[in-house]
């Protein structure tokens, strides 16, 4: 493998750009263009291009660290560090019970890691207290998608459909900064005569490319979508036949929308009625159209209802489950899609199964070789879990997140983390959260290990190992294997990712996210495979995908449930593939393999009766409206050159040069009132705390709103300010809107 070029994928966002890696003289790797991967066709953003910088030994962790009696983190051997973790977890369980031990995962972990982490929590620790950072990401869209369509796959169609639709409404999404190579799809859409509508309180680099930009007040997308639906009805633009044949629940939804008059919606959102009408015209006139949401409308305490309102608009106009049309969510993290399917979520088992479903418990318990009754029930959501640290949950194993920077109300969460009896963190660098741990384990990174991710398209991809890790660094799978053994479970936690994947195939078989027909070999040959991809039984009844599904361990009950949906889970539109007019993955000649499912719902939705569900929703205010004391709205988000909590990208010189630190984006009118000039430090104060960062004065933001990126720790940490008010369904915190005041900082 050494000295050759290895085709693989970027370690960062959900676009999962293809890239080639070749070993470099300094022991790291060089990134080069991989033109054969269709999604990015060789293009990379600065983060992907510079990712190898984090492999360098001066930057990353290369030895375990254990906190000494004196209180400092000191280098230690693996055996001692693993023993210490096992002791910390076991001791807590013995004293306080299994649910006093928590696990926190991440949507950046590969499918194999996410799967093993969920299994480790339920089988080895016996705890219900596991959740992950994806709760902070796309959980509102996932909840709304599930309740409308019976299934949550972020994009039910590939990105390549975008240039051929007629209109895209992009709601609270800034791909120019967050997924630059994907902008091509929107540019091509416009070149082909389609239109782009962007809805964002800021005039972002994405909004600058739109035919129409609506800039609502943060937190009012629900009213905006209802106003558009009102106009659709009033202007007679509904698709009555589609509504009759493919949906249920229209009457109530229609009534709810009719209560949201355009003038009322203008008052709530600040978007003038003529611009609402223009958006409706652009969306309804072409034959095909799409709505895509990202974190703007989703990271709200009513994010689920907000996404439902957008889905209602798509359904009422007959756009879901039809070629070149539909609703999609642009998932964020590298494995944001797969990471939410295989069991690191509080309420979930692999294959996107429900932990409360007796049939799902039986199936997975059998694969795991355990008694279904031994599996714990659902636990707390991410914020609630972090909030319980030091009280109900006294020890934590954390893998793939940096909540000290990225959790809402971060000063409080930092204090909860500090109050733990025991904290173990696996990371590639010493993040702000790892720095608080009792034990830190240095783990391998993307270029040093093999594993699968599932991109925002629902395309399962193979990341391949290109170089050997430094001595003294092991994989997350090795960590789980060793800890399981120390806690009395000798088998079931292999360190070979392909072996884990083979078990994941069986565990997911028959579930909504069915991976049973996918193999590493197929992934290598086919540039990825879209799920669901069941292992279809051949004529003689033996399951036969790119290889038989091995039945070791518990096994799949008499080969059943593989091709067909199991009785306890809804069918996932098996007919869709045959209907697919523009299928990308064709079955290989002669082999009875399922081709994968690039496009979902073309025949039927994944609900019991095959129809989509309208969900009647009404506008409600954000959890914390501005008042005299806190008169301004704060919203938060991203810049192109930093990634998430910045744990990785703040260690890359080139990225720091481009985005050196936090800032507060504010309108000239607000700046003038404060007497703040460009670059002056300003303080942003909320009921949770105070953050200070230089002013960036721009007319791109609404005068009633300030914006801060959340990539930094310390004084400029945006999450010191954010409000952990949770969505009642998805448990998503309100990252995108809270009340603040802005003050000039005098030296
Ligand atoms: N450079 C970079 N790229 C990334 C990441 C990163 O950290 N850095 N993270 C990855 C991940 S995990 C994710 S989830 C994605 C996120 O990708 P995006 O969702 O595109 O990113 P955000 O900047 O969080 O939010 C998008 C936009 O929402 C707007 N917004 C704020 N409040 C509201 C509101 O109330 N309504 C509406 N309609 N819009 C609002 C913001 O102004 C912002 O421009 O990016 C991925 N890609
Ligand atoms: N104010 C505000 N806050 C937000 C958001 C917002 O828009 N506004 N967005 C939210 C969203 S969408 C997200 S996704 C979260 C993300 O926030 P975090 O969960 O903090 O995400 P990362 O910074 O990517 O943290 C990943 C950590 O895992 C490490 N890591 C990377 N790969 C691996 C691996 O394979 N194994 C292990 N063990 N560790 C690894 C990295 O070095 C890093 O320390 O932030 C949320 N917080
Ligand atoms: S857009 Fe995302 S996947 Fe592509 S290179 Fe940038 S960070 Fe990596
Ligand atoms: Mo995210």
Image (cartoon, rainbow, N blue to C red):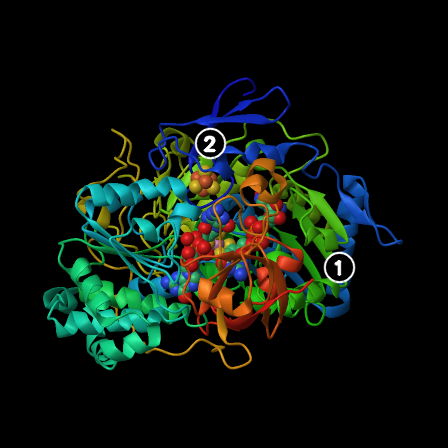
Above or below for 703 versus 435: below
Circle number at residue 146: none
Quarter of the image holding residue 473? top right
Q: Residue at x 52, y 44 (%)?
A: 112
Sequence-wise first label, 2 or 1:
2
Q: Nearer the viewer, residue 235 or 538?
A: 235
Q: Where residue 739 sits in the image (x, y, percent)?
A: 51, 73
Q: Where residue 678 sits in the image (x, y, percent)?
A: 53, 55
**Left or right: 626, with 195 as reference point:** right
Few, some or many residues within 10 Å of mark 1 (<14, 14–19, 20+): many
Which residue position holds label 1? 422
Q: Nearer the viewer, residue 629 or 190?
A: 629
Q: Where residue 63 sits in the image (x, y, percent)?
A: 75, 38
Furthest toward the top, the residue is 3
Q: Secondary structure at mark 2?
A: strand
Which residue position holds label 2? 8
Q: Secondary structure at mark 1?
A: strand
Q: Nearer the viewer, residue 321 or 678?
A: 678
Which quarter of the rendering shows the C terminus? bottom right
């Amino acid at each position: 493998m050494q000295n050759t070029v290895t085709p693989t994928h970027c370690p960062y966002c959900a676009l999962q750009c293809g890239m080639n890696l070749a070993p470099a003289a300094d022991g790291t790797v060089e990134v080069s263009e991989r033109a054969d991967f269709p999604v990015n066709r060789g293009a990379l953003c600065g983060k992907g291009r510079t990712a190898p910088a984090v492999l360098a030994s001066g930057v990353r962790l290369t030895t375990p660290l254990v906190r000494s009696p004196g209180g400092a983190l000191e280098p230690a051997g693996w055996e001692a560090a693993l023993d210490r973790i096992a002791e910390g977890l076991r001791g807590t369980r013995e004293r306080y019970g299994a649910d006093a031990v928590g696990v926190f995962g991440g949507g950046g972990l590969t499918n194999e890691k996410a799967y093993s982490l969920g299994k480790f929590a339920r089988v080895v620790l016996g705890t219900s207290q596991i959740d992950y950072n994806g709760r902070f990401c796309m959980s509102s869209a996932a909840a709304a998608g599930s309740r409308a369509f019976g299934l949550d796959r972020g994009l039910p169609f590939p990105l390549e459909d975008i240039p051929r639709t007629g209109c895209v409404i992009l709601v609270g999404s800034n791909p120019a900064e967050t997924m630059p190579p994907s902008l091509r799809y929107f540019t091509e859409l416009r070149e082909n005569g389609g239109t782009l509508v962007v809805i964002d309180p800021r005039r972002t680099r994405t909004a600058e490319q739109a035919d129409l930009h609506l800039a609502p007040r943060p937190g009012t997308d629900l009213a905006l979508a209802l106003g558009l639906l009102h106009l659709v009805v009033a202007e007679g633009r509904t698709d009555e036949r589609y509504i009759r044949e493919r949906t249920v629940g229209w009457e109530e939804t229609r009534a709810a929308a009719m209560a949201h008059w355009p003038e009322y919606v203008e008052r709530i959102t600040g978007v003038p009625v003529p611009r609402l009408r223009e958006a409706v015209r652009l969306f309804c006139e072409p034959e095909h159209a799409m709505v895509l949401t990202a974190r703007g409308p989703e990271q709200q305490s009513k994010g689920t209802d907000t996404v439902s309102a957008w889905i209602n608009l798509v359904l009422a106009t007959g756009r879901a489950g039809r070629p070149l049309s539909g609703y999609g969510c642009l998932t964020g993290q590298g494995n944001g899609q797969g990471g939410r399917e295989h069991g690191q979520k509080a309420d979930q088992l692999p294959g996107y199964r429900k932990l409360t479903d007796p049939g799902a418990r039986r199936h997975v318990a059998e694969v795991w070789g355990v008694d279904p009754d031994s599996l714990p029930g659902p636990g707390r959501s991410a914020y609630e879990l972090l909030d319980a640290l030091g009280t109900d949950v006294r020890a934590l194993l954390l893998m793939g997140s940096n909540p000290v920077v990225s959790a809402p109300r971060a000063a409080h969460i930092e204090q909860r983390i500090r109050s733990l009896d025991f904290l173990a963190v696996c990371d590639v660098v010493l993040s702000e959260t790892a720095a608080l741990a009792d034990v830190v384990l240095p783990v391998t990174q993307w270029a040093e290990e093999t594993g699968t991710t599932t991109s925002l398209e629902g395309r399962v991809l193979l990341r391949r190992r290109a170089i050997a890790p430094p001595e003294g660094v092991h994989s997350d799978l090795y960590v789980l294997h060793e800890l399981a053994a120390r806690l009395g479970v000798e088998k079931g936690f292999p360190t070979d990712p392909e072996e884990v994947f083979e078990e994941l195939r069986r565990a997911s078989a028959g579930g909504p996210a069915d991976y049973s027909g996918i193999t590493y070999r197929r992934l290598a040959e086919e540039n990825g495979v879209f799920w669901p991809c069941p292992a279809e039984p051949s004529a003689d009844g033996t399951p036969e995908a790119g290889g038989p599904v091995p039945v070791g361990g518990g096994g799949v009950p008499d080969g059943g449930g593989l091709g067909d949906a199991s009785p306890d889970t809804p069918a996932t539109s098996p007919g869709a593939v045959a209907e697919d007019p523009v299928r990308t993955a064709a079955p290989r000649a002669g082999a009875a393999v399922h081709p994968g499912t690039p496009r979902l719902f073309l025949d039927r939705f994944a609900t019991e009766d095959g129809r989509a569900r309208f969900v009647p929703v009404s506008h409600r205010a954000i959890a914390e409206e501005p008042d005299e004391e806190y008169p301004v709205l704060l919203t938060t988000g991203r810049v192109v050159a930093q990634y998430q909590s910045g744990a990785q990208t703040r260690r890359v010189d080139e990225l720091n040069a481009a985005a050196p630190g936090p800032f507060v984006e504010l309108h000239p009118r607000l700046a003038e009132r404060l007497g703040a000039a460009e670059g002056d430090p300003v303080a942003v104060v909320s009921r949770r705390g105070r953050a200070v960062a230089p002013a960036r004065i721009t007319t791109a933001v609404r005068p009633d709103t300030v914006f801060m990126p959340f990539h930094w720790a310390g004084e400029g940490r945006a999450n010191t300010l954010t409000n952990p008010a949770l969505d009642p369904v998805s448990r998503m915190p309100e990252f995108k809107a809270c009340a603040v005041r802005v003050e000039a900082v005098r030296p």
